[in-house]
Amino acid sequence: MKIAIFGGLGTLASEFVVQAMVASHFVSWFIHTDDELTDTSLETPAYRDTIRIVRGSSDILSKYQETIAGCDAVVVAFDARYTQPSSWVHQQRLIQTAMRRESVQRILVITTHGAGDSQRRLDWSTWAKLNVDQVRYMLFGQVDMCWSIVAQYTAQEDVVTSSETLETRDGGSGVDSDDKLPHRDWALQWTILRPGLLTEGPATGTYLASHDHIFGGHISYADVSDCAIKALEENMDIGECFSVAYSARVA
């Protein structure tokens, strides 16, 4: 397969790239302009039949299209330690807009266990009690700023399951009149993979789990990537969300 991967140099995205290449898939990898690769040879002609690395800003649609062009599927694996969670929803819309323009329908999005249960409507009393340092955001009405990683993953999932591109959201604004969309009946074929289990306690009980809590000690990045590759290879779980935890490598 030819697979586009979004997630930059995040641990999960990097692991997926390695496993996909080992499995003889071609990888198109989007990273930031100034990212430093551990293996700089990946950008040399020696690997041009194996991997395509696209560098650019995360808000330029043409770079998303360049990454997705000619691919069979897209994998999105955002990492809060690498990409600001507040940008995930916008980036997801850019990805889907680029997929629509490039006639690519298959996407697998990796979020986290429990993401579908997290909404804007949090348990404010518990949240405030255990996170006093965040109360100032409530007082000034800056609700979005206190969204957790889990809630941001939920918002990203909402964009995926509703197939909300920038064009559908804005009614086509910003699209040139001569820009013919290849398929009017384009529809996203999505799968959402939710790895890991949230631990008990204040850090997670208030929806303010850190990335380490989400993935820490429950399932390895290698196994998450393996699940994602299998789902794409076998065309499994289209239109489904599933969680996986406690891998043999960790348990």
Image: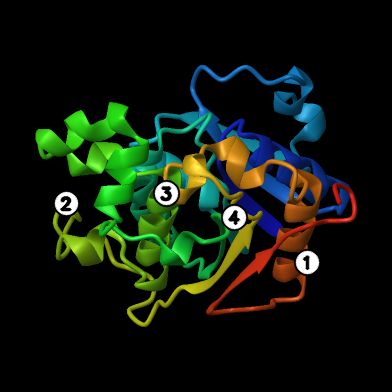
Q: Which residue is drawn at 52% across and 71% down?
A: 190
Dot 2 amino acid type: Gly
Q: Name the residue under label 1.
A: 230
The part of the image, by quadrant, that contains residue 36 is top right
Q: Mark 4 points at which residue?
A: 75
The part of the image, by quadrant, that contains residue 48 is top right
Q: Which of marks 1 and 4 is nearer the N terminus?
A: 4
Quadrant for the N terminus in the image: bottom right
Q: How is the image coloured?
A: rainbow
| Residue 207 disc label | 3
The part of the image, by quadrant, that contains residue 181 is bottom left
Pick the residue in front: 105 or 93: 93
The x and y percentages for residue 72 are 62, 64
Instruction: Kindly report the distance in space between the C-alpha atoms of the residues bearing marks 3 and 2.
Output: 36 Å
Closer to the camera: disc 4 or disc 2?
A: 4
* Cβ atoms under marks 3 and 4 closer than 8 Å: no
Instruction: Kindly report the distance in space between the C-alpha atoms of the residues bearing marks 3 and 1.
Output: 30 Å
Q: Name the residue under label 2.
A: 174
Q: Residue at x 26, y 50 (%)?
A: 125
Q: Earlier in the sequence, mark 4 or mark 2?
A: 4
